[in-house]
Amino acid sequence: MSNSNHAERYLKILVALTTVGWFAPVWSQGEQAGATGDPIQPGAARIEEIVVTAQKRPENVQDVPISITTFTGEFMEDSGLHTLQDLSLFTPNLTLSHSSQVANNRIIMRGLGSVGDNAIEPSVAVFIDGVYYPRTASVVGSLTDLEMVEVLRGPQGTLFGRNASMGALNIRTAQPTDEMEGNLRVGYGSYDAMRVSGALSGGIMENTSGRVSFSYSDRNGYGDNTFTTGQSASDVGEWRDLSLRGKLYFTPTDTLDITLSADYSEVDNGGGVIEVKTDTLLPTYLPTLSVILNDTPLTPGGPVPDGADTFDYTLNQDHRDLGDDRQMGFAADINLDVNGHTIRSITSFRDWENDTFESALRLPADLLNRVTGYETETVSQELQILSPTGGRFEYVAGVYYYDEEYRIDQDFDLGDDFCNPTIRNLVAGRVARAIPTITANLVASGIPQPFAGQLAGGIVTGAITSVAQIQAVAPFLSAAQAAGILATVPSALTIGAAAAAACTAGDQISAIDGEFSQSMSSFALYGQLTFHVNDRLRVTGGLRWTDDEKDGSYLQTLNNPIVDAPTGSPYRTIGLPFSVNLRINESFPNLRFEDDALTWLANISYHATDDIMVFGTYSTGYKSGGFNSDGANRAIPRTFSSETVDNYELGVKSSLLDGGMIANLTLFRTEINDFQDRVFDGVSFIVQNAGELRQQGLELDIQARPLEQLYTVFGLSWLDSEFLTFTNATAMPYVIATTPPGLVPPGQDLTGKRNHFSPEWHISLMAEWTDRLPNMDWSWFTRAEFNHLSEQNVGAETNQNPQSLQEGYSLFNARGGFRSPDEKWEIAAFVRNAADEGYCQTIFNQPIGTTLGLVDPVSRGGMQRCVLGTPRTWGFEVGYSF
C-alpha cells in the first residue's frame, strides 16, 4: 500500500475517533439535571498550566523554546503508564525497544538510539531528579511516584551535566510535603499480573519532611515453550520488579534547602519472547536443522524450532533466558539562595548489577549458552549557579564531574548437545557435501561410473568400511587398489566423531571467557545566557566544553578449540573449511581513549502575541567514543571515535481557544557525523563509525479540552531519514562466522538509504470523557488511546535487509472506571493492545545461521528472529489517596 493510501486510512481513523469524542455530549446532555449528580455542564475549559524545569528553572512549558512533550504523574497514573517504554504511546519520535536480552534495550529519539548493555554511550540521556543514569538497561523497571516526565528533543548539553546528543528524558519524582498525604493502588490482570504501589509523605519535625514510595509487580510470561527437557520451562518472559524510594527534605534556614534521597530496585525476568520469523523460512531450513540436531548422523529426525506462526507466542528451544537486575543509589540535592542567585549542588552515587543467562542459538537443543554479568559504579558531582529571574539577563552556569567504573564478564558455555551430536553432524555434513568432488577425483584416477559414485557415497557415509565391500561394488579392483581408495576417501562419520571428541575434550564451561573493564572520568563546563531584548523577544546562547578520558582492558580467552579454527586446524579437511569460528584469543590490557569537544547553542524566540511564540534554534551535540566491549572472531579496532550532531529547529507554540487548546509544532533537521553503527558477528555486536546521517521532519503536539468533560491529546511526527554517506555498511546478511579467519567481511554502500528504527509516521491519539453518574456524586470516565507506527526496518544491524522490515501497525488501548466525589477513590478496568496486534520490536539474524545452513546463497537472506511486542492484556485497578 502506498504512503498516500496509508495516510488516508489513518486520517479516516482519526476523524472517526475525534467525531465520537465531540458527539459524546449529545448523549450526556440528554440526562436531566438534579440536585445530586448533575451532569457536568458543557462548555470549553482551560488546560492546566504545566510547569517544567527543562531549562533548570520552573517555567510554563509554553514559554520554553524547545521541542518538549510532558507528562504529569497524574496523567501517567490515569493512563496506566509505569515504564519508559509506555511513554512512546503518546510521544512523537520516541520509541523504546528490547532486543535479544531485556538488558539490551534502546531509547530511540528521532530515529537514533544506542543499545544500552555495552560500552557505547546513550544517544538519549536519562536523568531522574537531576541524576544521570548512564546505562539505559538500568531503567527497564517500573517508575513510581512521579511528579513529571519531560521528553526533550535535540541536543541538551548546555544545560545538563552529562551530554545528551539526541535528547533527554528529565524525570522528577514527587517531593516530600509538610501535610500528611499518601496513596495506594492495587491491580490484577491477565497473565496473573499483580501490581501494588503506594507513597506516604508528611512532616517529621519542624523544617523536616519525608516521603517513601514503593511499587511491586509480578506476572507470568507471555510465551509458551513446548520444549520440556533440561532447564526449560513452559512459561517464557515472566516479570517481577520491585522499586523503593525514600526522600528527606530539610529547610534549615529560609535560604537553604536540602533533599536527601535513596532508592533501590530489582528486576527478575524470564527474557523476551523471541520467535522464528516465519516468512524467512525456506523449505530447506527446518529439514537441515533436523539432520544437524539428530542423534543419528546424516539422517533427519532431530527437533526443530517452532515455525508455524511468528505471532503465536509459542517457541521450542532448550533453556529460557533469565535476567537478574539490581541497582541502588544515593543523592543529595542542595539549594542555597545568595543575593537572589541560587547555587545548587547535586551529588550522587549509583551501583548497578545485571546478570543474564541466554540461550544464544535459541534452538531445541542444549547448545551454546551466554552468561553475562554487568557491573557499574558511578559518582557524579554537579554545581550550578542560577541568576535571578525577571531581569534583562538570565543565566545558568555549571561545572560537572562524572566518574564510572564499568565491568562486563561474558562467558559462552557449551551445552550437552553442542559437541555431540551437533558438531559431529555439522562436520560430517560438510564432508558428505564433498561426494561429487570425490566422485570426480575417482573418475580421474581411472574408476568409471557408476562405480566411482557408488564408492564415494558409500565410503563417505559409512556404508562401505572395508576392502571386501569395495571389491563387492567394483570387482575389477585389486585388494591393494581397494585399500588405497579406503585410505584416501574420507569418512564423514570418522571425521565428525573426531571433531566431536576434540570438542568434548576441551572446556565446556567458559569455552569462551571474555572480560572487559573501563574506567571513565568526564569533566564539563557549561552555561547558557538569555537576553530579553524586550517583553516579546529574547535571544539565548549556550556553550559547553567536555573532556572525556577512558582507560580500559579487554581479554578474551578460548578454552575449547572448536570455537576457534585458524588455518591449519584439523577440522579443515579435504579443502572444506569448517569451524564454528566464534572468537579469537585477544588481549588488550591498555586501552586508552581521550577526547574533548566544544558544543554550543543559539536560540531566538519571539512572542507574536501573549498566546503564540515562535522560535529558531541551532545547536550542536557530542557523544563520546570509546571501546568495543564485545569479542570478535577477527582482529577489529577496539576503539571507535566520537559522534557529533548539528541540529536545526524552527517551532511555534500556541495557546488557542482561550486556553482550551495547546498546539505546538517543530520542524527539525539533524545531521550526525561519524555515526556510531553496530555490526553483528553472528553472536555479538561490534561498534564502528559510519559516515553521515541526516534525520529531518516535524513534530506536532496538541492538547485540547473543547468541553469540560472531554480531554484529548494528539501527537504526530513525520521523519525523513537518509544516509548522506555510508560506504562501509555491512553486507546482507552479515554473519562473520562464515568469513575465513583474517579476512575482512564484505560491505555495502548504503548512501542514500534510510536508517533503521526510523518510521516515516508516528501518530498517537488519546481521548478521555468524564462525567457524573446520574443521581450520584461519583463520576465515571472512559478513555481511548490509539498509537500507530508506519513501516520501518527494525533490524538489529544496519544492513537494509528487507527481511527485517516491520510493516506499519496500530495499537488500541481503552480504560474506564469510576471516581469518588473527592477523587480519593478510583476503580478502573483497562485493556491494552485490544486488537491483539502482533509486531516485532527488533529482528535479528539467526546466530551462526550460515554455519547451520540457514542462509540462502542466492537471495543472501537468512532465517530471522523476531522479538515480540506485548500481546493483549487486561486488568483492574483500585486506587485510594488521602
Image (tube, rainbow, N blue to C red):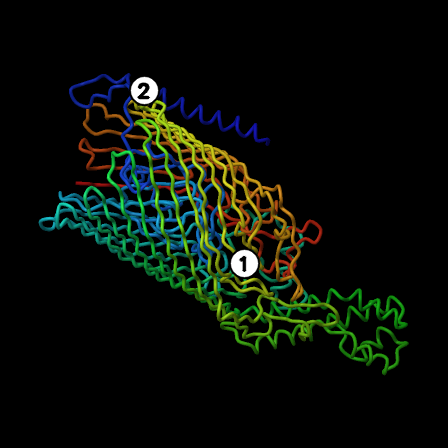
List x then y, in percent, for residue 491: 73, 74
Q: Position of residue 623 (x, y in %)?
A: 46, 51
Task: Name which quarter of the figure residue 737 lies in.
Answer: bottom right
Q: Most extreme residue toward the left, as rendered?
A: 206
What is the number of the mark on residue 25? 2
Image quarter (top left, top right, bottom left or bottom right) of the C terminus: top left
Q: Is residue 235 visible?
A: no
Percent position of residue 253, x then y: 12, 48
Q: Quadrant where the N terminus lies?
A: top right
- In the rendered view, tell whether residue 136 sits above or below residue 608: below
Instruction: Say which amino acid is labelled 1.
Output: Ile
* Residue 221 can be seen in this image: yes
Which mark identifies residue 664?
Answer: none
Q: Nearer the viewer, mark 1 or mark 2?
A: 1
The residue at the point 17 percent across, 48 percent down is 256
Q: Residue at x 56, y 74 (%)?
A: 560
Q: Which mark is residue 686?
A: 1
Q: Locate residue 703: give its quadrant.
A: top left
Q: Position of residue 268 (x, y in %)?
A: 36, 58
402 or 656: which is nearer to us? Answer: 402
Report helix, strand or loop for mark 2. Answer: helix
